[in-house]
Structures are given as C-alpha cells and as structure tokens.
C-alpha cells in the first residue's frame, strides 16, 4: 500500500513538473520570443520587416524588392521566366531536367517570344538567364547582361537613347555581396520604376 501511494504521488509530481515546463516553454517560445523578435525587427529594420515594399510617388504599394513580377508592356525591362507567374504562395519550380519535353518546349517558346520582341538582337546574344527559371520562381533580379540586351527594344519603343538606358542599368546594378558572394544583379522593379519616370 505504501509503495502504491508513493508511486502515485511520484507520478503526480512528475506530471506537474511536465505541465509547468510545457506552459513555460509555450509562453517563452510561442509568445515572448515572437513578440520580442518582431518588436526588435520593427524597431531596427522596419522596411525589411514589412516585406521591403516599394511605393510610388502617391504612397501606393506597387511591389516588393524581394519578389519579381511580370511586366507585360514590352517597353519595360522583363525579368526571368517564372513557371508560377511570380505567385509567392506557390514558390518553387518544376525542376525539369534539360531533356524534359516540357522544358524543351517552354525554352523554344521563350526563344520564339524573344525573337518576336527583339528582332534587332540575335538569339546568339540572348543570355541563358532570361530563358531559365529561378529555383523559387520569384527572383526579382536579372544579370546586367540580361538588362543590357533589352536596351535596343526599349530604346526603340520609348525614344530614350541607348546611352541613357545603359546608364540607368549601370545605376541599378548591385555588386557582389561583401564584394565576394553572388553575382552582380539588377532589380527589375526598381529599374522599371525609374524608367517609368524618364518616360514621363
């Protein structure tokens, strides 16, 4: 009887310890930590914490510098191919092998669309990055070469000189992170915002 009572009391004590520990971790990890980290992010990095949103001159949000979007007007710079049409909730790509028939057809379609929109630029000068999907399908950047190869088309459609557009691309080209990591890149949305201002 004594052993049974002792065992029951021990189990009850262990249960209370586990319950208190669970409540403590729920409060710490589920409430306190998220509130503190969110508060610090809003205090120290408010722009990044709110999605790195870009606003127009009227204060309207027109996109995020972190997520690419499609530009249907050929007078603007175009971004990379996106198999998910830049829908952030569906991030990812099909990861097709180069020999996949769907991949081959999409690439042929992309090249044909390029030829139709850019008759003054030979296909041999078309950067591979413009007809390949990024891993996320949301890449907001293109390479400087991918921007420069679009200049003849945009110059013809906007009336802006090629030199002006080259300077614009150069202005919006970000170098390697810390001078070492990654490749130089151009944010397409930010580039097109300034292009839009030049067209006015």
Image (tube, helix red, strand yellow):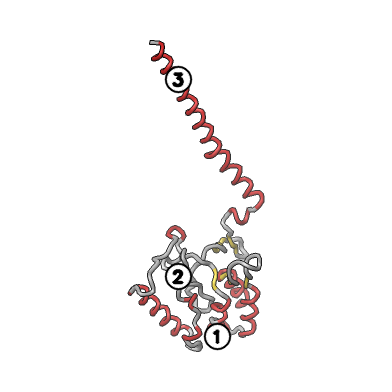
Q: Please give the name of the residue rendered at 56% of the width and 82% of the height, measured from the top-left corner.
A: 151
Q: Residue furthest left?
A: 101
Label placed on residue 77: none
Quote the CA–CA distance across marks 3 and 1. 81 Å
**Which of pointers 3 and 2 lies earlier in the amino acid sequence?**
3
Disc 1 to disc 2, C-alpha distance: 23 Å
Q: Position of residue 126 (x, y in %)?
A: 49, 82
Q: Position of residue 171 (x, y in %)?
A: 65, 74
Which residue is disc 3 drawn over?
10
Residue at numbered disc 2: 133
Residue found 48% across the figure and 78% down from its top: 128
Q: Quadrant of the N terminus?
A: top left
Q: Residues within 10 Å of mark 2 (few under 14, many from 20)?
A: many
* Secondary structure category for the residue under label 2: loop
Residue farthest along the top direction in this orientation? 1
Label 3 vs label 2: CA separation? 60 Å
**Relative to 160, 67 lies left or right:** left
Which dot marks residue 152? 1
């Amino acid at each position: 009887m004594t052993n049974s009572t002792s065992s029951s009391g021990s189990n009850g004590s262990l249960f209370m310890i586990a319950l208190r520990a669970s409540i403590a971790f729920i409060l710490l990890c589920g409430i306190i930590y998220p509130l503190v980290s969110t508060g610090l992010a809003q205090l120290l990095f408010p722009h990044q914490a709110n999605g790195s949103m870009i606003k127009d001159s009227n204060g309207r949000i027109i996109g995020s510098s972190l997520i690419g979007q499609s530009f249907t007007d050929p007078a603007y710079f175009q971004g990379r191919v996106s198999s998910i049409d830049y829908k952030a909730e569906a991030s990812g790509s099909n990861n097709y092998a180069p020999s996949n028939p769907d991949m081959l057809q999409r690439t042929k379609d992309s090249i044909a669309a390029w030829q139709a929109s850019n008759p003054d630029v030979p296909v041999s000068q078309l950067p591979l990055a413009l007809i390949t999907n990024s891993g996320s399908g949301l890449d907001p950047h293109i390479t400087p070469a991918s921007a420069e190869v679009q200049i003849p088309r945009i110059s013809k459609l906007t009336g802006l000189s090629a030199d002006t557009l080259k300077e614009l691309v150069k202005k919006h080209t970000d170098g390697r992170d810390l001078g070492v990591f990654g490749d130089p890149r151009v944010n397409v949305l930010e580039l097109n915002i300034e292009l839009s201002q030049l067209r006015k």
